[in-house]
Amino acid sequence: MHPHGHPLPSTLHRPPARAPRRERRGVMALVAVCWGLTGMTLGPILYGVGALAVMGAAEGLPVGGYLVRTLGPVVVWAAVLTALAFAPGVRRLARETGLLLTGVLAVPAPPVLACRLPLGFR
């Protein structure tokens, strides 16, 4: 019997210790490359879309349709990636693996947007 009247030692009442995580530096490097490439290419494209929209609005042109045509696919793709990231199967993966999966799928978004980007208003 335990000295304080408990039938089990107090060490058995503690929550189980978590196993130490393995270092996955290679996967995290790939994640950084994928998301960095996506961010570095998407940023200037979105800046260009915004600048064209502001210049068009300053000249009195309707910019709503232009923004829907150019930014609509980006919003839809972001919603798809968010839904994928929160899907139960992806959430069960290791954090690094889930980030790599969504990062690899996010890389094609900027070139597709650049191909769809019109050079002006029509």
Image (tube, rainbow, N blue to C red):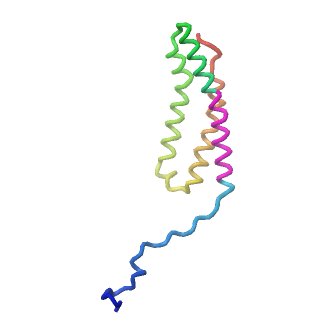
Q: Is residue 31 above or below residue 67?
A: below
Q: Is residue 109 left or right of residue 79?
A: right
- Nearest the viewer among 56 and 118 is 56
Q: Is residue 74 above or below residue 3?
A: above
Furthest-left residue in view?
5
Q: Is residue 75 above or below residue 119?
A: below
- Nearest the viewer among 93 and 22 is 22
Q: Is residue 30 left or right of residue 99?
A: right
Place of residue 72 in the rendered image (x, y in percent of width and height, measured from the top left): 52, 26
Place of residue 83 in the rendered image (x, y in percent of width and height, measured from the top left): 48, 42
Residue at 56% across, 7% down: 59
Q: Is residue 108 above or below residue 115?
A: below
Residue at 47% across, 47% down: 86
Would you say residue 37 sits in the magenta stretch? yes
Q: Quadrant of the C terminus?
A: top right
The magenta stretch is: 28-44
Place of residue 76 in the rendered image (x, y in percent of width and height, measured from the top left): 51, 32
**Magenta segment, prevailing SS (helix, strand or loop):** helix
